[in-house]
Image: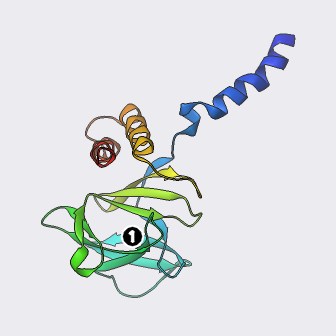
Amino acid sequence: MRVISWAAPMVLAALSVSPAMANPQAFEDNKVHLKTCDGNHVTVRWLGDDFKVALFGKATGAAQGSLEFLGWDGNCQKATWNTAEAAFAVGNDDSARPSPFLKYVAEDDAKWIGVRNGDGFFVTRVAKAGENISNARLAEVADWLKRTSPEFTPGAALAKQLSIAGGD
C-alpha cells in the first residue's frame, strides 16, 4: 500500500502530460457550437444543405444558405455547402474555395475543425484557447484520429484531410 500511495500521484502526473491525455476531443453531433463574426455563441444544425442557426436555444429565423463564423485566424469567414463537390465553400465572396472542413472558434475560444457527416457534424478540438496551430499539431491530431477512428468513419476521413492540410 505504501508504494501505491506515493506512486499514484506520479502516475497521474505522467498521464496528464502524456500524448494520450493531450489529444483533442472528437465526437459526432447533430450540431456545432461556434462563435459568429460579432462574437455571439450560436448552435448550427443542417436543414438539407442549408444551415439552421440558433442563438441561446432560439432559432434565428429561416434556414440560411450561408453561415458567417470566426475562423482560426480571428477573421470572419463565410461558408456555404456545395452539394456538387460535397464540400464547404469557405471564404468571402470571390475568394471562396472548396474545403472538406470548417476551421472555427468555439464558444470557449478553442479552435475546432468539423466535417459534414450526413445530417450532422464530426468535430475535433485542434487547440485550446490561446494555443497556436502548426503543421506539426495538425499531424498530431491526424495521427490521433487514425489510431482512434475505424476505417471508413468521419474520424478517419478527417484524419486523411488533416494529413493533407498539414503537408501544405
Residue 21: % across, % down: 58, 35
Q: From the viewer's side, name the closer residue of 80 and 19.
A: 19
Q: In which quarter of the image is residue 118?
A: bottom left
Can residue 1 be seen?
no
Horizontal arrangement in the rendering, residue 98 relative to residue 75 (left or right): left
Identify the residue at image location x=28%, y=35%: 151
165 or 168: nearer the eye? 168
Tell me residue 111's x, y (percent). Answer: 49, 58
Residue 93 % position (x, y) = 25, 81
**In which quadrant of the rendered view does residue 163 lie?**
top left
Residue name at image x 57 percent, y 39 percent: 22
- Position of residue 70 relative to residue 8, above or below, is below
What residue is rendered at 33% in x and 70% in y? 46
Residue at 46% x, 57% y is: 112
Disc 1 crowd rating (10 Å Cα; few below 14, some 14-19, many 20+) is many
Q: Which residue lies furthest to the left in this view?
A: 84
Query: Mark 1: which amino acid?
Result: Arg
Query: Tag 1, which secondary structure?
Result: strand
Above or below, 8 relative to 136: above
Q: Name the residue under label 1.
A: 45
User: Is 86 rendered above or below residue 16?
Assistant: below
Q: Is residue 132 left or right of residue 120?
A: right
Q: Left or right: 31 with respect to 100?
A: right
